[in-house]
Image (spheres, helix red, strand yellow):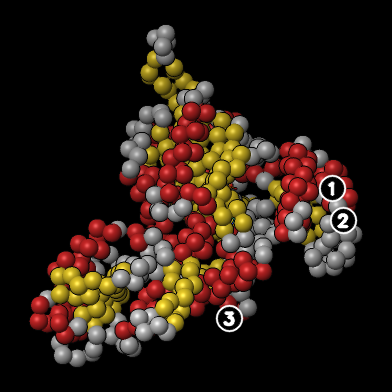
Amino acid sequence: MSTTADNQFQQIISHAKEYGFVFPSSEIYDGLSAVYDYGPYGSELKKNIRDYWWKSMTQMHENIVGIDAAIFMHPTTWKASGHVDNFSDPMIDNKDSKKRYRVDHLIEQFADKLSESGKEEQAKEILHQMDALLAAENFQGLLELIQNNKIACSVSGTCNWTDIRQFNLMFDTKMGSVSDDADTIYLRPETAQGIFVNFLNVQKTARMKIPFGIAQTGKAFRNEIVARQFIFRMREFEQMEMQFFVRPGTQMKWYEYWKEERMKWHLSLGLPAEKYRFHNHVKLAHYADAALDIEFEFPFGFKEVEGIHSRTDYDLRRHQEFSKKKMQYFDADTDEQGKPYGNYIPYVVETSIGLDRMFLLVLSHAYQEEKLTKEDGSTDERVVLKIPPKIAPVKLAILPLTKKDGLPEIARALMDTCKPYFKCFYEEKDAIGKRYRRQDAIGTPFCVTIDHQTKEDNTVTIRHRDSMQQERVKLEDVKSIVMQAL
Ligand code: GAP
């Protein structure tokens, strides 16, 4: 990351804390690495993003239903899914600093530095070699790549590396009061398995016909080794996942469908297309026959925000094998020759987006420092969060110009009219300019000022966050103006 981008990112992190979006977890004890808490405005924004996803998946797609599965699952789930044996990253330790790195991150950081110093071709070549070696799981080759390029530890500055080893990312704990006898259980590293094990319960009770989807949002846990970049990579985070069950052989058609559909969802928030790109996976996860990331240009470069994975019938087949329960679907439809499809294990196309990562995407894109020239020629500055209105934490601030002359009563009445429909904020204190700035800083798209003219003609001033334009509108129209924008 360049120094300017780094500075800007640090500003965003400070702003998030100062204005009640994100706090370090248990901060009074100096925090817990890669764990964060969401404050009053952060929890609203997070909920709005979650609701927007949930609505677009379940309400707008008649063939998708939701569930809310438990975080704890039978331990065999993770044996069957392959996470016990395969959910690991290649790691390397520096013998001098004892610092552990994810191999791909170490090499990527080195490539970033090369690019920044104008050696873009060399950076590309190293990343190309890394992708090929990762795909072949050639750890000796990766170690040689690190050594040949003299990639050093950022703490010790030395190239004194251990061999590369796999490190499992699942957290485990014990269930039951006597830990010696209790079984080890895992905190789920993805929400998807709660969907797979409930596949037949959902299909039968909601009477779903293939193709259909099951959506879920919820916490996931990973013992990430390199946890950095604020809420981008956390140890406790939230996923929004949807498994779409299809006829075997049709998965690539649905993979393409969901790739486009999910990109449309992102763009429907008014986020710019040029900040997005697709990245096809070279090294496929153990369950996938095709996979890509939707990447966004964060302040620290293009990074994954969502994954689209064609997971084949791997998970359902493995659960059938381990549980000895049939995971088959009976398809009464017939093919072109009139032959019934009959019983089969469906294939699955998954869409999986990190809620916290989407939050960071929205926040970092929305954050703007603006220099303003006032009418009298003097200059001013403001920090504004240009959050898409439909997911903004507060939609409307209601601000009586003074605390007297009956203005608060009118403002309170407007508050009562609007608050059942969208989140409003009421404030009487401080000069109006100061109040506007505070609303800009939390991303409120509309402010309404009630002044003495309101008493005469029932009109108010509505101020638009992004343009800062003010217009006089009828008091009774405020609710519909805001609702229209949402
Ligand atoms: N069920 C498939 C799955 O979990 P993934 O690519 O490992 O796939 C999906 O994760 C999404 O979850 C990622 O695109 C990312 O947005 C989010 N995610 C993964 N690990 C994360 C972490 N440590 N912190 C925050 N978000 C994470």
Q: Are marks 3 and 2 in contact (CB under 8 Å)?
A: no
Q: Earlier in the sequence, mark 3 or mark 1?
A: 3
| Residue at mark 3 | 28
**Percent position of residue 432, x then y:** 31, 84
Is 176 rendered above or below residue 9?
above
Number of other residues with Cα within 10 Å of mark 3, as a class: few under 14, some 14 to 19, many 20 or more: few
Q: Do labels 2 and 1 touch, CB within 8 Å?
A: no
The quarter holding residue 12 reads bottom right
- Is disc 2 surrounded by few (<14), some (14 to 19) or many (20+) residues within 10 Å? few
- Residue 14 vs 57, above or below: the answer is below
Q: Which residue is mark 1?
A: 145
**Quarter of the image with the N terminus in it:** bottom right
- Amino acid identity at mark 2: Lys
Regarding residue 411, the answer to whether it shows in the image is yes
Q: Amino acid at mark 1?
A: Leu
For the residues labelled 3 and 1, the Cα–Cα distance comes to: 43 Å
Q: Earlier along the polypeptide chain: callout 3 or callout 2?
A: 3
Which mark, residue 150? 2
Task: Give the CA distance from mark 3 to mark 2.
Answer: 40 Å
